[in-house]
Image (cartoon, rainbow, N blue to C red):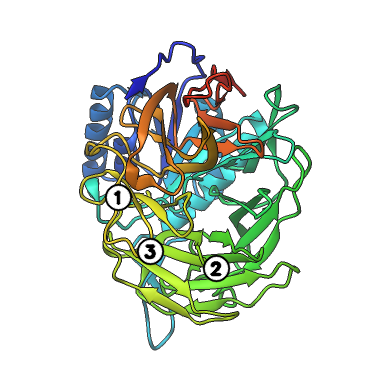
Amino acid sequence: MTRRSAAQVPEGRGHVVAVVVPEPRDAVGPVGREAPGAEIAVVCLRPGGKDGRAALDRALAAAEARGCRVRGGPRVLDADAGNASAALAAELLAIDPERLHTLDPDPVHTGVDEATGVLSYGVPDEHAETAAVVLAAARAHQAATGRPLYVECRRAERVPGPGDDTPARYPVPVNWLSAGFDGRLSAFLPTAAGVVRWHEEVPGGRWRGPELLEGQGLLPGLLVIRDPHGLPHLLALRRTARGDGGADVEVVHAAQYRTGRPPTPWLTLGGPNSAAWRKGREVGFPAAAFDAAGDLHVFVRNFGHSVSHRRRSADGTWTPWQHLSGLRVADELVAVTAEHGGVELYARARDTPAVLRWYPGPGPGGAWSEDRTLPFAARPGTLAAAAEPGAVLFRDARTGRTCFWRPGAPGPYPLDDPAPETGADGPTAVAPGVELAGWGYSVLVGKGADGGCSLGAHPAARPDTGVWWQDVGAPSYGAPAAAVSRTGRLAVATRLPGGRLLVARRDESREDGLVLGGWRPVA
């Protein structure tokens, strides 16, 4: 592995993290996930019980021992339900966090009373109520400060895998960097107040941003995909309060057709269960891809934990939501464009690390089929589309190695060394179309075991020949991203603690190697 010095990377603002939960016991998991270097402040709406406070004290002590800084014990809001938002807003101003952890505002049901149809949940009602209050306060805080506030909401149920962790309600965007027709880059990230964007004024020149894109009620998750022309399309979930005290959650879509110009208004796609808001609010986060004809295919996990699909033809006509039968799935779906020109779907199973695949039948409107025989299992939160048609990348559930699989292969291809139980994790982004010494390559970018950005490359369509990895000398909070311009120039972006972005382009003077130029701070 080639290593480069990180000395040229500028320092960012302090990495301050707020954990806002109903009681101290609910903060144990988020505190335990924080990496060294974070500065943690815990806010609780209620004091909770003695056992919960003791468990949090132990978690905070362990966080300090591994290199985190803790801002004292948990702050308990002295507020009733009527003024909790105001009290929380004051705490956030005092803490001034970069990131915020809270719970799931729309938990999934665990049962249905057959006689009354009333839904039951495996978590107390105050979990969702607290999360809704926290999201509103986080939006207000971002509006007041003008700085992006990144929010992570966690579900209550645990998923199989290392650490038996709880899943994120809204996924981290895998490839949030995009190159326009003129070579200018755009970066998109989800925040408490909606999607923020940075863009270059000229290729390789000064950046503008972060700019908050219009869109009320967007939840803190984002999917960025590219159409056949390379233009970025954004998909998200939007939550709207109802007059009866409930909330509608719907899938929304927007597109950027010119770098630096406003994207299209967010178009609602509704959801497969939107006729009944209590069911509709449970919709999973969307996955999407374009087929060779330019049709956009959108998939979500529905109320019954199977998959629903909707398609927009190239002329702008949308089909109704269609239910695809099959096994129950988790909130981890990835859509890919296959060699046959159609779109296929991968999804991690709900109760095991197994991965399922759906593919369409021949001809327009062909019936969907499910494949349950895929010869691999994936760690939660690591499924991503590969550069090769119809293929996926993931981390092996047992070894943690980054792997590649395409339909028809007898097994997955490992692309790196076994990963430790902690460290390297998360999805791997891809950037196809990079030329090295006259040959086409696909570039992979991910977060390494030491928290830095790692870059890999393999010959186009031949990941089985091996990947050459290098540490490119930049830290990365969250998943780094990569983009290739129409002229083939590679750019890589990471996010520094403190909220700033770093971007580096390939050094074009080094035709025989994959070498990045200096890292430049964006914001």
User: Residue 249: x percent and y percent?
Assistant: 58, 63
Total number of numbered discs in the rendering: 3
User: Measured along the vertical axis of the image, is residue 39 above or below residue 246?
Assistant: above
Q: Mark 2 points at which residue?
A: 342
User: Residue 231: x percent and y percent?
Assistant: 68, 48
* Quadrant of res 276: bottom right
**Residue shown at the point (60%, 58%) measured from the top left:** 239
**Residue shown at the point (29%, 37%) measured from the top left:** 32
Q: Residue furthest bottom?
A: 115
Lower sequence index among marks 2 and 1? 2
Q: What residue type is labelled 2?
A: Gly
Viewer-side residue, 367 vs 81: 367
Q: What residue type is labelled 3?
A: Pro
Q: What separation in Å lies between label 3 and label 1 (alpha carbons)?
A: 12 Å
Decide: few, some or many residues near mark 3? Use Cα within 10 Å; few <14, some 14-19, many ≥20. some
Q: Which mark is residue 479?
A: none
Q: Name the residue under label 1.
A: 413
Can residue 248 be seen?
no
Can residue 240 be seen?
yes
